[in-house]
Structures are given as structure tokens and as C-alpha cells.
Image (tube, rainbow, N blue to C red):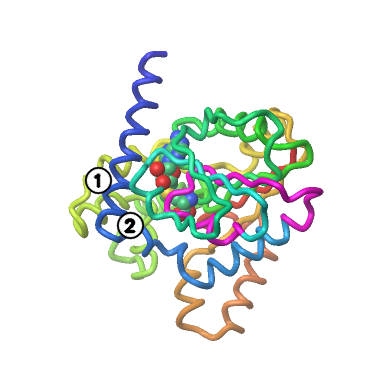
């Protein structure tokens, strides 16, 4: 039990180290999810979810970082709360809209009352937790009945395992450049940040236990956990197919959409080709 607590504490420390490091060298905001087309996509998802809510009083963004979600959603709610543990990230949040409050707190244990928020969000966040189940319990507690939780950019275990299998079973020289890049991103992200920016690779690995230890999230397992906690529904979408960025930026729109339609028609066989999972849970 105490070794669990030690590990939990190390994960928190590594998160503070990694995020203050990245924001300190102005690298964090260059993460791929800040690209305009992704911001547009996330904004449209949040708008759709918001339309379905009875009231639009309060939203909470867990692991708000520099305010990626807050920037895209603050005009849709009366009050917006951002929760994080890394001050250096929170210092970058644009508070000028006037309805945003930041709270330095563990996402798994917040100071808010039960049944308080209409919408809860967590973007590029759950893989940074030692135990995402404790976090989901907290999300459930603070959401109003009928409230919605939107969690995005969660590494897909089926993709991670496929990358591991490819890396261990196939002679590497036979891989295309794209597959090399995907394997590096999935399995050797720490090494990349260390060689590029001098960040300690082991710290990055420890900051993402949902990716490095658990090898990502299994859609069916998360859905079962949500059900056990009491969410009335949990929907999952598979997103960002392998090499999608290149298709979006370098090929025509038609080609990219054709691939998306084809892969989607091949599910569940194509599940392992998607890097991330998006969950929408309703209390
Ligand atoms: C990858 S960043 C995502 C930030 C933002 N959501 C985004 O999409 O740009 C993960 C954030 O989670 C924060 N974090 C990690 N563990 C946390 C915890 N247990 N409670 C609250 N925040 C945490 C980190 O400090 C960091 O700012």
C-alpha cells in the first residue's frame, strides 16, 4: 500500500517537473493538439455537448494546463474552473474573459461540493494519472445529475500494443519512415524529449503511467468502469488514425476523408490503427 502511495507521489512530482520544464522552454504550446484544425474539432465537440445540457452554469476542466480547453469553452458557461497541480502551466491561462477561476488541487480530490458542475472536461490528461478510476469517482461526484464528462486524447491500448508487437517482431529496417515515427512517438517519447530539449526521459515516462505502465486505455474496460461508478452512459470514439496528420496536411481533403470512411467501415478490425480514444460519459 505504501509503495502505491510512493508511486502516486512520484507520478505527481514528475508531472510538475515535465510540465514546468516544457512550459519554461515555450514548447508546451507547440504540442500537436494546439493546431488550429484540432482546436476547431474540440470546440465543435464541446458546443454539441453543451447544447444537450439543461443548464450551462458551471464547467470544470481537470488538468487544465495552460488553458487549452478553457480557451475553447469559456464563452459557453457562466463560470469556468480550471484545476491543475503545476503552477507554471496555470500561470499561462488567459484569465481576461473574467469568468475563469483556477484552483491548484489534485484532480482526484477537489474542494467542490457534490452535484456542482454541468460539464467536466479532461484533455490529454487521464494518462497522467496514477489511477484513473479514483479520478472518475471524483468526476462523478462533482457532476450534476445529467451532467456530462468529456475526456479526449487518451492513448489507445490496442494501438500501443500493435506498435510494441511491430517493434519487437519485425526487422526495423523494413519499416516505412512513418511507422518508425509512430513507434518512436508511442514507445520512445521520453528519449525524443531528452535528445531534443534535455528533459529527463525517465521523468516523462513516470509522468504518463497510463501510457508507459498501462500501455494506454482499453475502450471496453473504461466503459465498464464508468458503468460500475454509476454513469448512465459512456460512449467511445476512436480517433487520429495512424499518420492522419500527414494526410491532413499534405494530401487533398477528399483523400483524407476517403481513408477515414474506409477505416471506420472496417471497425472493429481497424481499432488498432487509431492512436487515441475519446470518452463522453453522462451522469
Ligand atoms: C498534458 S497536460 C494537459 C494540459 C491541457 N489539458 C492541455 O490539453 O493542453 C497534463 C496536465 O495535467 C496536470 N496534472 C497531472 N496530474 C494531475 C493531477 N493529479 N491533478 C491535477 N492536475 C494534474 C499537469 O500539471 C498538466 O498541466
Asked if one can make out residue 273 in the rendered structure from this viewpoint, the answer is: no
Residue at 70% over, 28% down: 228
Comparing 29 with 169, the one in front is 29
Neighbour tally class for label 1: few under 14, some 14-19, many 20 plus, Cα within 10 Å: some
Q: On screen, 172 above or below 202? A: below
Identify the residue position indicated by label 2 in the image.
184
Q: Residue at x 52, y 53 (%)?
A: 153
Furthest toward the top, the residue is: 1
In three-dimensional space, the C-alpha distance between marks 1 and 2, rounded to whole angstroms, equals 13 Å
Q: Residues within 10 Å of mark 2 (few under 14, many from 20)?
A: some
Instruction: Read off the magenta span.
Output: 50-74
**Is residue 230 toward the left or the right of residue 92 in the image?**
right
Label for residue 140? none
Q: Where, by quadrant of the figure, is residue 70 drawn?
A: bottom right
Identify the element where label 1 is drawn.
helix
Q: Quadrant of ligand 1?
A: top left
Q: Nearer the viewer, mark 1 or mark 2?
A: 1
Amino acid at each position: 500500500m505504501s509503495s502505491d502511495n510512493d508511486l502516486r507521489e512520484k507520478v505527481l512530482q514528475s508531472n510538475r517537473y515535465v510540465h514546468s520544464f516544457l512550459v519554461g522552454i515555450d514548447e508546451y504550446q507547440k504540442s500537436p493538439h494546439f493546431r488550429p484544425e484540432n482546436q476547431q474539432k474540440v470546440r465543435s465537440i464541446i458546443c454539441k455537448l453543451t447544447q444537450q445540457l439543461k443548464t450551462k452554469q458551471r464547467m470544470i476542466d481537470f488538468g487544465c494546463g495552460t488553458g487549452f480547453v478553457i480557451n475553447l469553452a469559456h464563452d459557453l458557461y457562466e463560470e469556468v474552473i480550471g484545476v491543475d497541480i503545476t503552477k507554471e502551466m496555470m500561470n499561462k491561462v488567459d484569465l481576461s474573459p473574467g469568468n475563469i477561476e483556477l484552483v491548484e488541487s489534485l484532480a482526484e480530490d477537489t474542494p467542490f461540493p457534490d452535484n456542482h458542475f454541468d460539464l467536466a472536461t479532461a484533455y490529454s490528461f487521464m494518462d497522467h494519472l496514477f489511477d484513473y478510476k479514483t479520478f472518475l469517482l471524483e468526476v462523478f461526484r462533482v457532476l450534476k445529475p445529467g451532467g456530462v464528462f468529456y475526456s479526449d486524447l487518451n492513448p489507445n491500448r490496442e494501438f500501443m500494443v500493435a506498435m510494441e508487437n511491430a517493434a519487437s517482431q519485425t526487422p526495423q529496417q523494413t519499416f516505412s519512415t512513418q511507422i518508425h515515427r509512430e513507434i518512436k512517438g508511442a514507445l520512445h517519447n521520453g528519449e525524443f524529449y531528452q535528445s531534443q530539449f534535455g528533459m529527463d526521459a525517465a521523468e516523462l515516462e513516470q509522468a504518463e503511467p497510463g501510457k508507459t505502465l498501462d500501455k494506454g486505455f482499453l475502450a471496453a474496460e473504461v466503459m465498464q468502469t464508468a458503468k460500475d461508478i454509476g454513469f448512465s452512459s459512456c460512449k467511445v470514439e476512436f480517433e487520429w488514425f495512424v499518420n492522419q496528420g500527414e494526410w491532413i496536411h499534405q494530401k487533398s481533403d477528399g483523400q483524407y476523408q476517403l481513408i477515414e470512411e474506409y477505416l471506420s467501415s472496417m471497425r472493429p478490425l481497424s481499432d488498432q490503427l487509431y492512436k487515441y480514444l475519446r470518452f463522453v460519459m453522462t451522469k
